[in-house]
Amino acid sequence: MPDPTLNLIPVVIAGVINMVIGALWYSPLVIGKLWIRSMGKTEEEMKQGFSSAAMGLTYVINTIASLLFAYVLAHIIKFTFTNTFAGGVMIGFWVWLGFVVTTVIPGYMYESRPKLLYFLFIIYQFISITLMGGVIAIW
């Protein structure tokens, strides 16, 4: 059941922040080329791997996931009575460490995925989640 006392503006802003950071992080300007190489693929293979319909669906699902993550993070911040940027960053850090780092690593290990992919992903998540927490907390 939705919480009518929760301000949805910072939730939406935090979700957008997550999407923007992800777009920049995985772009050729930051780690995009390294990310593609670490998967053992070429840029051409990546472009061929997604039809425009599949890419559109991926963006829709990613947007929904980002907004849902921000909504849950907002609840945690609200329940802890955190209202400073630094406090929100700290909540984001603990959420990242306890729920992202620990739940993502088994999949990478069992699937024998390159460790570099794991580290690239969790670093992006660290930056995004801590910033999301800070933004949500000051609203």
Image: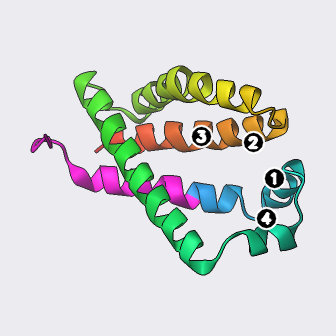
Residue identifier under label 2: 120
Q: Which of marks 4 and 2 precedes in the sequence?
A: 4
Residue identifier under label 3: 125
Tell me which amino acid carries mark 1: Trp
Residue identifier under label 1: 35
Q: Which-is-in-front pick, marks 1 and 3?
A: 1
Do callouts 4 and 1 mark residues in contact (Cβ within 8 Å)? Answer: no
* Residue that appears at 69% across and 55% down: 25
Q: Which of marks 1 and 4 precedes in the sequence?
A: 4
Q: How far is mark 3 from mark 4, CA to CA?
A: 18 Å
Q: Which of marks 2 and 1 precedes in the sequence?
A: 1
SS category of the residue bearing label 3 = helix
Do callouts 1 and 3 mark residues in contact (Cβ within 8 Å)? Answer: no
SS category of the residue bearing label 4 = loop
SS category of the residue bearing label 2 = helix
Tell me which amino acid carries mark 4: Leu
SS category of the residue bearing label 1 = helix
